[in-house]
Amino acid sequence: MIYFDNSATTKVNSESLDTYVKVSESIWGNPSSLHDFGEKSFQLLQQSRKQIANLLNVRTNEIYFTSGGTEGDNWVIKGTALAKQQYGKHIITTSIEHPAVINTCKQLEKQGYDVTYLPVDKSGRISLSALKSAIRKDTILVSIMLVNNEIGSIQPIVEAAEVLKNFPSIHFHVDAVQGIGKGLNYILKNNRIDFLTFSGHKFHAPRGIGFIYKKFGRHIESLMDGGGQESNLRSGTENLPAIASMAKSLRLLMEDESSSVNNQISIKKIIYNHLDKFENVTIFSKLDEKEFAPHILCFAISGVRGETIVHAFEDNGIYISTTSACSSKKKETSGTLNAMEVPQSLSDSAVRVSLDENNTIEEARQFNQVFDVLYAKFSKING
Amino acid sequence: MKYSEIMVRYGELSTKGKNRKDFIQQLGNNVRHALKDFSSLHILAQHDRLHVKLNGEDSDKVIERLKGVFGIENFSPAIRIEKDIDKAKEFAVSMIQEQFKPGMTFKIKTRRQDKNFPLHTREINDALGGYVLNNVNGIKVKMKNPDIVLEADVRMNGIFLSSSTIEGAGGLPVGTGGKATMMLSGGIDSPVAAYLGMKRGVKIDMIHFYSPPYTSPQALAKTKELTAKIARFSGNVQFIEVPFTEIQEEIKAKVPEGYLMTIQRRMMLKIADVITRQRNCKGIFTGESLGQVASQTLESMMAINDVTNLPVLRPLVSMDKTEIIKIAEKIGTYDLSILPFEDCCTIFTPPAPKTKPDTSKARMFEGNIDVDDLVEKAVKNIKVTNIGPGDEFLNSQEDVFAELL
């Protein structure tokens, strides 16, 4: 099997799974317990936090564990809305965010908040002038994703950060779920970013675990109240096996980040250059490394529905997806391609190949061979 | 920039006449100790300066360590180049450019040990200064208080150039001021007091009172880790753990509530007195600050101090809490100090301790317990640990976790 659907989820790596099992078996005390058995869990919790903070070059007290990307996005956005409502109720985001951001904003709109959804250009990027003119006196939050999950476009985060330096009271949130381990640390470390969302299962940690970065001094309200865990901001007994396992996954991910990114770039190039030869293929992602992430390649075959393409590849043991796993089971068109003003007839034909460090050049060649066969078949039917 | 050596200038010790030689020797030892894990370094303590020859070691890390050594006024990383005035000119310009901002002034200060060097001191000043003026846009010369002083030191084995001066820790080399003990709790104040004692050259042994199960093992670990933090300023520190549970229970049972705290403190000081004399130390440091809490009023100090005639040294006596916190943050003990573990002082604290205890009453109530026997037992059962800079106690599981993470 060739697994090219890594933006949907990744396989837990065996080292991290090993940690998960060992912690579950032998360090299962509650980190809040006073006795030394609980204390040991507490130390592992803090050690995991410290390791993640060190890997991202931030302070230990800036890392908060969550259940994943959706919770992180919900928390930062609603937490800001609650904490800053007396200063304003205006939020700026983009029209191509993940549903965890978009639908959270939609919910806030029902509560009386005003949301501006920035449009994107043909290559799926927002414009800075649109951002500048959207900022108002009552703007409390700007939330922009780092890497779009459907086509892989990298948003101009550094430039947006420059703009926001003149508005120091606005919270700046970056959904980095698709952007970790992809050679984008030069963006992640920008010091105007106040919040970052991460999800463990996108980098080979188990499901149900994630974390946010919250800049020291920035305040958001809690959404989960209870026993006061995570500095009283996110209550609930800590999911220690998953947390330790995620800390290990992140270390492994970042240890050989540059070689794995190069590998993904090569794979993407081989597929891209092949697809580019076909008349009826439209590729929405680009090779430019400053504008597009190395692991996502979105394309369409005119006249063939996306799900048909997915199933055709599946019959050949290759797993890809329609534009995003979250929406692919609903009969909805792609939010991102829609926002890019791609006609619906074409966006209905879009599929996504998404890579990780375990994919190989050989798999790319096999993909291309299978593609040739399928393309010929589709042409016959359409012909 | 890749530096070849660090020039260290002595602090107050240069004014100390006869003791000077001992001071320099002690400082040399302390520097060697602080840098002992850099194996390629060569350290030379001379009468006017101390030279740390880097031999390829990471200068940033060495500089970080030197900042914590008392007795150093300041120091400058220097580059060694060939004895060639043209090379010196090029390096002078690039070193100044590294820190130059518009509007800054500079001067060149040359020392010439090698009397065979073709140019004289003045000529070297002129040559380097002129070249810098022509090649760094907008820079001006200023003789008094310039922003940048570029020192050129012409020695037998090369020209040494340095341009930045880094502030040292000041004070006197630890060990030149004799030895004392310190009553260390886990709080904010006592580590700061120990630091200030060390700063005046005193080698300090830590005394910590430990009352399991009323105090947690983490509280003990935290105090040890605090010790490891300040060991950075003095080299290894002896940590003396005094079992105090029995004494506290005894006092609680037999002494009126208002005097619980006073008698406890008297017992602690009495034990500290014995340990201090045994170890040939000459005084007891405490973190007391006048008026901060009930036990730190003048009346209280008098009633407690009654049990010893050793000097009880209180470096924080007139400092405000905010000033103390500032130092604690600077020396890296604050975050540790505020970890919420029960320590000796917070347990057995009566709701309303006497802020003005009476010495004779304190003596009388103390009669209710067998002081000598309790002190003797406590002293007999002390546990001594040798703690080095950077040792870890709170996260002692780190190695176990390494495999998991």
Image (spheres, coloured by chain):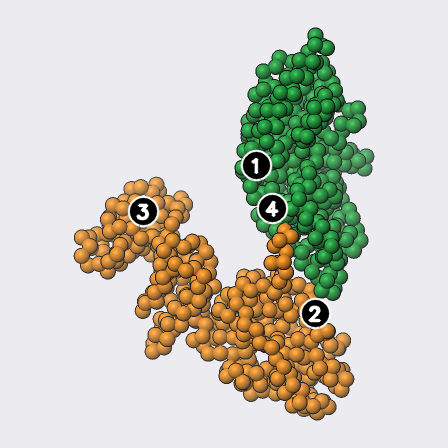
Residue type (three-letter) at the residue carrying disc 2? Ser
The N terminus of chain A appears in which quarter of the rendering?
A: top right
Q: Quadrant of the C terminus of chain A?
A: top right
Please state which amino acid type lies under the numbered disc 3: Phe
Q: Mark 4 — residue?
A: A251
Are there few (<14), some (14-19), or many (20+) residues within 10 Å of tag 4?
Answer: some
Classed neighbour count for the residue bearing mark 1: other residues with Cα under 10 Å, few (<14), some (14–19), many (≥20): many
State the SS at label 1: helix
The residue beneath circle 2 is B216
Point 60% across, 39% down: residue: A181
Q: Which mark is residue A260?
A: 1
Instruction: Tell me what residue is drawn at x 18 percent, y 53 percent.
Output: B118
Residue at (65, 85) in percent of width and height? B377
In this view of the protein, which residue sits in the foreground, A327 or A100? A327
Tell me the CA gap for discs 4 and 2: 33 Å
Do marks 4 and 2 share a subunit? no
Which sits in the foreground, A246 or B373? A246
Q: Nearer the viewer, mark 3 or mark 4?
A: 4
**Residue B302 visible somewhere in the drawing:** no
Q: If you read the primary sequence from the N terminus, does the residue marked by circle 4 or circle 1 appear first? A: 4
Circle 4 chain: A
Give residue B215's position: percent from left, percent from top.
70, 72
Residue B260 locus on image (x, y percent)? 72, 82
The chain letter of the orange chain reads B
The reply to whether the C-beta atoms of the residues labelled 3 and 2 are less than 8 Å apart is: no
Cα distance in 3D space between marks 1 and 3: 40 Å
- Kindly report the distance in space between the C-alpha atoms of the residues bearing marks 3 and 4: 41 Å
Residue B395: in sight, yes or no?
A: yes
For the residues bearing labels 4 and 2, Cβ distance under 8 angstroms: no
Structural distance between the alpha carbons of marks 4 and 1: 13 Å
Residue drawn at the location 66% of the way across and 63% of the way down: B339
